[in-house]
Image (cartoon, rainbow, N blue to C red):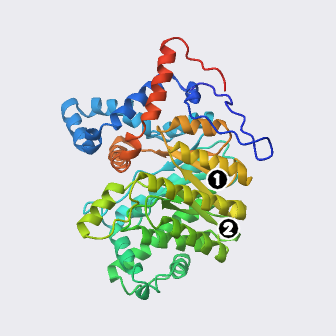
Amino acid sequence: MLRTCHVLYSQAGPSAGGWQPLSFDGGAFHLKGTGELTRALLVLRLCAWPPLVTHGLALQAWSQRLLGSRLSGALLRASIYGQFVAGETTEEVKGCVQQLQTLGLRPLLAVPTEEEPDSAVKTGEAWYEGNLSAMLRCVDLSRGLLETPGPTGNVLMQLKITALASTRLCKELTSWLRRPWDSLELSPERLAESMDSGRDLQVSCLSAEQNRHLQASLSRLHQVVQRARAQHVRLLVDAEYTSLNPALSLLVAALAVRWNSPREGGPWVWNTYQAYLKDTYERLRQDAEAADRAGLAFGVKLVRGAYLDKEREVARLQGTEDPTQPDYEATNQSYSHCLELMLTHVSHRGPTCHLMVASHNEESVRQATKRIWELGIPLDGPVCFGQLLGMCDHVSLALGQAGYAVYKSIPYGSLEEVIPYLIRRAQENRSVLQGARREQELLSQELRWRLLGRGLRASH
């Protein structure tokens, strides 16, 4: 059980004194029980072991054959599932969210449903319609879970477009978007008008079947945003592979034309920008300026990126230029520049420009908190922070207790739904998992202190 929390920090706002950097030394771990810390340490160490991540699905199948489904499932629930997943039932998810609220953290629900690129297993409109139902339920759950949801629009949810539109369609659209002389009919305004009116949209670069799927996909996306707007839930659209992202950004832009206008009080639809790609800063700058010119609200989730190995392998096999930054330091610089750009936009545009600093990197978080103070941005204003559930708690807890808006990305669902999803996320986030050594050291330190009888830290 989580212990009753109290304020660890009294973070000064822009009007009081100078900026005081937060300390990410694990001091907030005293808010958690020994069992939770022990599980976190064991699971993070397991996830940092490359063979487990690489062969996760095979190991899961082997475990079921050897131990049986019931015992294998119990072990998963007590370890990886319990660490990274909110639960399966509404009651379990609500319990997890209430614990987060006790710690000063907020939920960012994620439906663990998506289509893998070039998958031949999940096809047909019925599969996407089922995902639509799951997304609509997630919107309702996101709003309904919070007994005191706070200011209107502070409820956020993740949205993966490839759960509602096929990767094959997105790849086809991307190929045409990269030929600007042929892509004029693929304007966000044209897609938004079709989405809003329900009239058939015919795009010459697509086959009749692809046009029907595009129309159905636009309808699904429109229904999700319509429900989210009615429930005051903001949608953060995930970025994916570079072979898909231009199409995903087109669809986000179409949704933004319809739903991020000033009369709607947006932004209700945010896009995700991956700092590990070479062109991200320029795309972010152009998109921010375009939204400003069009008078649209602008929402951004800024991440480092999770598909590094796959992107480099695809570029090598196709003989094309590697789209990623050359090394980790270059990615850090890119993230820092994008962060500065967006914080400046937020300070100029106020409530019409929102940013999630989605990072497990302590220096990026420190940079953000310092600039928030220097620019006079309210702590609980249009800038928030995001980390994965079960990871980076030493940063999340310190931010939350200091008064910042902090969200934990929370998948939920059955073991059968979530474990494959978690394994794919682990494979995409190998560097994050293997880089969690500092968190493991802080967890070990806290547990040693408790075993030696000094479990209660002095308040900072």
The span from disc 2 to disc 1 (Cα, nearest Å) is: 19 Å
Where residue 118 sits, quadrant-wise, is: bottom left
Looking at the picture, which amino acid does disc 2 mark?
A: Glu
Mark nearer the viewer, 2 or 1: 1
What is the total number of numbered labels drawn onto the structure image?
A: 2
Q: Give 265 or 356, whichever is nearer the viewer.
A: 356
Q: Position of residue 199 (x, y in %)?
A: 50, 82
In the rendered view, tell whether residue 393 sits above or below residue 330.
Answer: above
Query: Where in the figure is residue 336, as x and y percent of width and height?
Result: 55, 55
Spot occupied by residue 18 in the image (x, y as percentages of width and height): 75, 42
- In the image, is residue 286 above or below residue 269? below
* Residue 235 visible to the viewer: no
Identify which residue is drawn at 54% across, 53% down. 157
Q: Mark 1: which secondary structure? A: strand
Percent from the top left, x then y, of residue 422? 37, 45
Q: Nearer the viewer, residue 66 or 16?
A: 16
Cβ–Cβ under 8 Å for marks 2 and 1: no
Q: Kindly give the residue lying farthest to the right in the view shown.
A: 15
> Looking at the image, which residue is at 39% across and 61% down?
324
For image coordinates 71% across by 48% down, the residue present is 373
Give the residue pinned by disc 2: 264
* Image quadrant containing the C terminus: top right
Secondary element under disc 2, as helix, strand or loop, is helix
Q: Residue furthest top?
A: 453
Name the residue nearer the viewer: 102 or 164: 102
Sequence order check: which comes first, mark 2 or mark 1?
2
In the rendered structure, find residue 383 and report the number of the disc placed on it.
Answer: 1
